[in-house]
Amino acid sequence: MKRLQAELTKERGERGRLAGSPGRLRRLARIAIWFLAIYVAIVAVLFLGQDWLAFPECILRKPWLGTPAGATADEFAVQSSDGNSIQAWWLPPRDWKPSDGALIYSHGNGENVSTNGRTLVKWRDELHRGVIGFDYPGYGKSTGTPNEQSCYASAQAVFDWLVREKKVSPRDVIVVGQSMGGAMATELASRQQCRMLVTSGAFVSFPDVAQDQYFWLPARYMVHLRFDNIDKIATMQTPVFIAHGTVDRTVPFAHGERLYAAASKAPKRFFPMAGFGHAPPKSEEFYEAVRQFLKETQPTI
């Protein structure tokens, strides 16, 4: 009798589990559909809003700070080839002359030229060269809309102004790029016979860094921006100095390593910054390394 009751109880349990399975499957299916819908929505938002993510200064604008205390800058605007008015600062050291050379600084995508005032002054004082900082279209006081080509055009316009108005030889111009500014600096150095290219926190390409940031999405195939630095550096003969923080969470350290490895045709130097993140370099060791590399690559003619 007990065995029979146990078998009946077991049979009723099996029927209950079988009866409940379709309900559980429907609930799981609904949950899966919700997750899929949310995933697709995130993909759509990132795809449609990728320009906002790439150029956040146009949406989340930082205040205009003016020149740093104790410093003076000649503020001017230059027209780029696509018709945009590009705002720039010129900070020469005292008694500067064209043969002293100059430096063009391209800032990151979340800044404007005024928020980099101290960085511009630091470069001027450390290398004793005239320094130009400028804003991309739609940044600071510059007009237009930022995109890959308009940002390249803004850097070229500043370079042309420096050569035309200040009579600096292209071979005496150092181009420096921080983060996304590394793309503008790399593009410029790949087109001009500059003195040196310096990048800090630069990425291999925009699709690569997008994939690193959104590893759970097919981000590489969603972006239309390219900023393909690695292919340009691979063909460059201009001396290349690449710095990268070992704990950079915005652009992983491996990007700096890959850029350095790709620079196979140019004199090059890699400067890993131990324990450093994504901010512009500030250490004396960094600037001393840049000065030393300048000496090592000094043209003999």
Image (tube, rainbow, N blue to C red):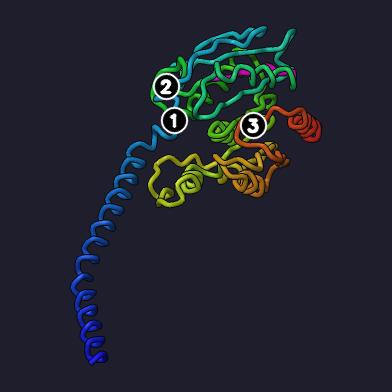
How packed mark 3 is, by other alpha carbons closer than 10 Å (few <14, some 14-19, many 20 or more), is some
Pointers 2 and 3 in contact (C-beta within 8 Å): no
Q: In the displayed structure, does residue 94 sit left or right of residue 153? A: right
Which of these two is toward me, 181 or 249?
Answer: 249
Measuring 56% from the left and 19% from the top, which residue is drawn there?
A: 115
Identify whether 291 is placed above or below 247. Answer: above
Mark 2 or 3, nearer chain start: 2
Q: CA distance from mark 1 to mark 2?
A: 9 Å
Q: In the displayed structure, does residue 141 sit left or right of residue 95? A: left
Identify whether 33 is placed above or below 196. Answer: below
Q: CA distance from mark 2 to mark 3?
A: 28 Å
**Secondary structure at numbered mark 1:** loop
Identify whether 221 is placed above or below 170. Answer: below
Under mark 3, the amino acid is Gln
The residue where tag 3 is placed is 193
**Secondary structure at numbered mark 2:** loop
The residue where tag 2 is placed is 138
Q: In the displayed structure, does residue 295 sit left or right of residue 70? A: right
From which residue to which does the magenta span run? Answer: 128-134
Q: In the displayed structure, does residue 44 sit left or right of residue 22? A: right
Measuring 40% from the left and 52% from the top, which residue is drawn there?
A: 218
Mark 1 or 2, nearer chain start: 1
* Residue 191 visible (yes or no): no
Give the percent coordinates (x, y) of residue 159. 57, 22
Under mark 1, the amino acid is Phe
Disc nearest the viewer among 3 and 1: 1
